[in-house]
Amino acid sequence: MPTVALALLHLVVLIHVDDDHRLLQAARQAWEQGQQEEAVQLATQAIERNPKNPDGALLRGTMLASLRKHALAVKDFDRVLELDPRRAEAHHLRGCERFKLGLFKDSIDDFDRYLAMRPQERAGHWQRGITLYYAGRFEDGKKQFEHYEQVDTNDVENAVWHFLCNARAHGVDKARSQLLKIGRDRRAPMTEVYELFAGRAKPEEVLAAATAGAPPAELRNRQLFYAHLYLGLYGEVMNDPKLALQHLTKAADDHRISHYMGDVARVHRDLLKSPHQ
């Protein structure tokens, strides 16, 4: 009898796990087909069916993050880590969402826990570098962007964020003299952005490069987003907060994009609008 009972229990567990898998697979398929509300509902059903399985909360949290429901996403990643503290990707994802909520210290804590588990990802973790900048840890941010050179030496954005950290720690002149050397970043208007921070271009050249050649509407919007983002960051480091807010508002509102950098623009815009919060 004990053997039969154990066999039946094992069968019940397998059926339960299989039901979880089918629900989660259906949720993923619905999401891929653009049925976002149904996808979230299916993930929720999987969580309710088996609240001890962290996969459901991880999937739903990822969906909620994409839907810009950052606080709800954080709660799901909290659930994942309560169930499985070694789930490294949940730390990374929660760190990203905490940054978007302006919780910079908590974001760094998550990124550090993630990298403790995935040390091979340290050099390429640019999100951590950006959070360090907003947390006021400029020297640490500078080092993070220096490490990124091991991953990509053609990224103007990495050089700019290194400049920003260095400028806040040691001044614009020193940052300019230590501006990272890069190869060719083919994205418009990144060459002009690099030259701007190097002191060899003017803001209007950045904007002109973003619209040169009459790019298609979506590409034009993305290029203008990056132009205004980095013009805003340049305005701030050059002690022109009014100009910084003007450009960051354009980036966050007029030329909004769904990429992580879109949230960076929004977070920075909000900080400039409410500097004492």
Image (tube, rainbow, N blue to C red):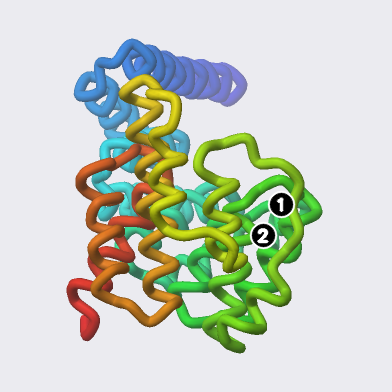
Nearer-N-terminus badge (1/2):
2
Q: Measure how far apart labels 1 and 2 are at the Cα level.
A: 6 Å
- Asked which secondary structure carries label 1, the reply is helix
Q: Label 2's element?
A: helix
Taking the view exactly as shown, the residue that stands out farthest to the bottom is 170
Of residues 24 and 220, the one nearer the viewer is 220
Q: Give percent across and percent down for residue 160.
A: 58, 62
In depth, the one of 123 and 213 nearer the eye is: 213
Q: Classify 10 Å Cα crowding around label 2: few (below 14), some (14-19), many (20 and above).
A: many
Determine whether label 1 and label 2 are within 8 Å by CB. yes
Question: In the rendered image, which quarter is residue 111 located in?
Answer: bottom right
Residue 264 can be seen, yes or no: yes
Residue 186: image x %, image y %? 63, 35
What is the number of the mark on residue 121?
Answer: 1
Can residue 52 be seen by looking at this rendering?
no
**Local crowd size for mark 1, using a 10 Å CA cut-off: few (<14), some (14–19), many (≥20):** few
The vertical placement of 186 against 127, above or below, is above
Q: Image check: 176 left or right of 12?
A: right
Amino acid type of disc 2? Answer: Leu
Q: Quadrant of the C terminus?
A: bottom left
Q: Which of the numbered marks, if any, corresponds to residue 115?
A: 2
Residue depicted at 36% across the width and 41% down the height: 224
- Residue at the spot 57% in from the left edge and 87% down from the top edge: 171
**Quarter of the rendering occupied by the N terminus:** top right
Residue plotted at (31% across, 53% down): 75
What amino acid type is highlighted by mark number 1? Glu
Residue appearing at x 25%, y 67% in the figure = 245
